[in-house]
Amino acid sequence: MRRALSLFLPVLPLAAQSALVSVIRQPRATAAEFTVPITELQVKDHGDLAHLHLGVGLGLRHWDDGDNALRFIADANAVAHEIFVGFGAIVEVPPGEGAFLGPRLRVGWAFHPSWALSLEGEHLERPFAPGLTVRRRSSLGLVLTARF
């Protein structure tokens, strides 16, 4: 029992932090992401609460035509005065193709301390693509984010 308990002790500080789950609907695709925190900060100033989340995670994008792509995410999200702002870096790897990478920006409304609805813009490029292949993917989307 002591041995099993000592295995879980390094994980216990992360239990106080919360993971983010996002569901994104874009014009031609649907995506889901799960982000675990690297660090989180909460600041209370005159009764107002501000929350900052820095994390990394995984996601999956499903295109309406049936293709899928794995996504690796590093993001920073902040909630203050019912305003949700997020910035992230994405690496998207479709099967059989080179990786797309680039930034994203989210701005929206935090209608609950753990829920936010936002508009997302992302611009992904494939920097080392050969020939005349698709090199860019830019899209807008509507995002529902929940903190657990």
Image: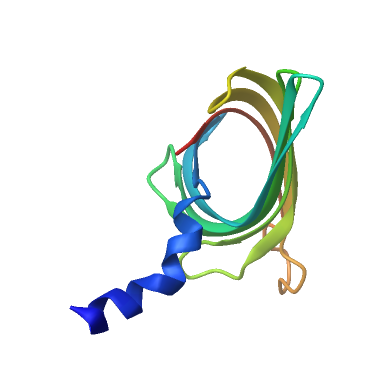
Q: Nearer the viewer, residue 82 or 101?
A: 82
Estimate the x, y position of residue 109 in percent, counting from the top left: 67, 18
Q: How many marks?
A: 0
Q: Is residue 47 above or below residue 27?
A: above
Residue 124 percent coordinates (x, y): 72, 53
Report whether 61 appears left or right of 47: left
Q: Position of residue 22 (x, y in %)?
A: 51, 38
Res. 135 visible in picture: no
Give the residue drawn at x 24%, y 80%: 2
The residue that appears at 49% across and 59% down in the rendered structure is 14
Query: From this viewpoint, which residue is outermost toward the bottom?
Result: 3
Q: Is residue 30 visible?
A: yes
Residue 115, above or below 55: above
Coordinates of residue 99 in the picture (x, y in percent): 62, 67
Please report the residue visible at 62 percent of the width from the left and 55 percent of the height from the top: 55
Front residue of 127/92: it is 92
95 relative position to 81: left or right: left
User: In the shown orientation, is residue 18 left or right of residue 119?
Assistant: left
Q: Quadrant of the C terminus?
A: top left
Q: Residue furthest left?
A: 1
Residue, far right: 46
Furthest-top residue in this view: 111
Residue 83 falls in image quadrant: top right
Query: Going 77% across and 68% down the picture, which residue do you hit?
Result: 127
Question: Which color scheme does this rendered protein use?
Answer: rainbow
Vertical order, 130 against 17 (above or below): below
Classify residue 50 by image quadrant. Answer: top right
Q: In terms of depth relative to the viewer, which is nearer, 35 or 89?
A: 35
Q: Pick the quarter of the image with the N terminus.
A: bottom left
